Amino acid sequence: MNEKTRDWTDDELAFLAGYDASRYPRPSVAVDVVLLSVRDGDLWTLLGRRHEQPGKGRWALPGGFVGFDEPLDATASRVLVTKVGLSDVFTEQLYTFGSAGRDPRTRVISVAYYALVEPALLERAVEVRHEADLRLGRLAVPWPGETGGPVGAVDERGAPLQLAFDHAEILGVAVKRIRGKLDYATIGFELLPTAFSLRDLRLVHEAILGRALNKDSFRRRILDRGLVVATGERATDVGHRPPELYRFADRSAT
Amino acid sequence: MNEKTRDWTDDELAFLAGYDASRYPRPSVAVDVVLLSVRDGDLWTLLGRRHEQPGKGRWALPGGFVGFDEPLDATASRVLVTKVGLSDVFTEQLYTFGSAGRDPRTRVISVAYYALVEPALLERAVEVRHEADLRLGRLAVPWPGETGGPVGAVDERGAPLQLAFDHAEILGVAVKRIRGKLDYATIGFELLPTAFSLRDLRLVHEAILGRALNKDSFRRRILDRGLVVATGERATDVGHRPPELYRFADRSAT
DNA sequence: ATAATAGTGTCTCTCAGACACTATACC
DNA sequence: GGTATAGTGTCTGAGAGACACTATTAT
């Protein structure tokens, strides 16, 4: 018999079962959003500089507290609208971070979301709200595959950005998640404009996975699955033979 | 330009950004645990009858409120110990359910966990705590693959069990999750005793996936990956040629 | 013409499914 | 011997990687 069960004394059980946390102070609940995009073969995320303690001067994911009657998804949308100026973005719940000491002020449980957006929109958001100390950080993933672990961010010149709280952990979970979902979900498409070449799509996949992909089999796989439809148009001014442009296939056609 | 950005008036932004939910009443945070096992080719989960409104008389996942300074994982462990009598069980966070009306009393955000345990332990837990109105429910999954959607529970004779709150949704997410993780994780092993035949392991996989698997390629795949090691012993009293028994390979050997 | 990438065709390797066959227990 | 499952060997088909080759545009 392994140690998976043991007998508890009546005292222990009474104490533990009688503990009703709802009668005690409640933790705060917040939502943090990992807003991801792919540019120049790298993953980038939106960060905001903190102006208050704790973590003053450090860079944090955009976030906000959950209203008493506000659904979690609504909080994520509200954060994107108010702090970044984006609406109608692909958003999905990631993981809930609830360690005791992650925020030194008080107990804050953070429900993390990730959102995917094409780089042009993200760059515009940063420009428009530059005064708000928003910036993009390039993700530096120190592990291969889906190993997992914290992920840091660096600026355009490669200098590390100090991240607030446990946000490096959150970035790590986000990268691991989208790497895992890339195969069987349509994640790549959220990161591209309406029309794109298969090369664009492959570069997005390579940036997410952090490794090179076989050009030929990537093309075959994407086309065979019927996920994309040729638009009949071609890119221009590319300095070489222009590629056919594709768009997403209607999902109902799957 | 699609409708992914729009201009917000200063008034809108001031209102939305100024809303600091931390100054308002906080939602309660609870943990619910989907305790899963495989028996007779089906997935079973542990349910407790509710003795109070709302949902009086219905069947609910074991759960509890999160203490103010209690990590989420610790709440999940505490629930398993106090309500089921199990400790040292494989447990992983599943998803956080935060719709506004999921508990009619007040706002309750539930961080769902799933746990995997071999059937003998689960049956013993139900027997020992029978007076506590614990029982096992057999999952009835109405969708194939990883489609997703609510999952109901039925009793031994196939009669539906009325589930409380949104617990059918939680069961659905749990099934979808373990189906997705089965391929690349060692989920099946958590549901088996120390020594098991490859047939046992295959039946566990089939119960999780809800479909039959090819006997030969399953054997090859498991053995080729080196996940299991032959013990040199064989099962007895099986009414036919007795199979070799295997155990998990040491994980560091991978 | 050269550079650079697009796009096609083919070979091979791996792996899962299918199937045939032998092995070994209990009845 | 009959039955049921364990376990092995082989064929086939799908899909990914590798690679050779042609196509098309900008310079």
Image: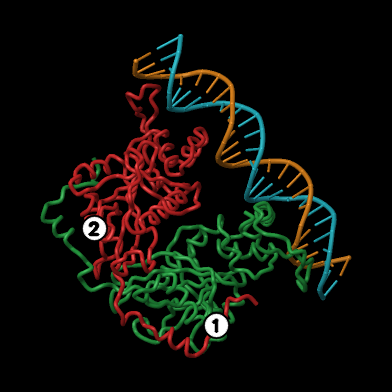
Chain colours: A green, B red, C orange, D cyan
Q: Does residue B11 sit above or below A62 in this rendering?
A: below
Total marks drawn?
Answer: 2
Q: Chain of mark 2?
A: B
Q: Residues within 10 Å of mark 2 (few under 14, many from 20)?
A: many
Q: Position of residue A13 (x, y in %)?
A: 15, 55
Which residue is under mark 1? A126
Task: Say if B186 sits above or below B96 in the image.
Answer: above
Is residue B191 visible to us here? no
Q: CA distance from mark 1 to mark 2?
A: 44 Å
Quick one: B14 or A130, which is closer to the camera?
Answer: B14
Q: What residue is rendered at 36% in x and 82% in y?
A: B20
Q: Is residue D10 left or right of residue B115?
A: right
Circle 2: residue type: Arg
Percent position of residue A119, x then y: 60, 74
> Which of the image's four quarters has the N terminus of chain B?
bottom right
Disc 1 residue type (three-letter): Val
In the image, taking residue B7 as reference, residue B64 lies left or right, namely left
Q: Nearer the viewer, residue B11 or B191?
A: B11
Check the residue under mark 1 and report the chain it is in. Answer: A
Left or right relative to A201: residue A165? left
Q: Residues within 10 Å of mark 1 (few under 14, many from 20)?
A: many
- Residue drawn at point x = 38 percent, y = 56 percent: B170
At 59% from the left and 63% from the top, the residue drawn is A188
- Place residue A227 in its image quadrant: bottom right
Q: Which mark is residue B78?
A: 2
Q: Closest to the observer: A200 or A10?
A: A10
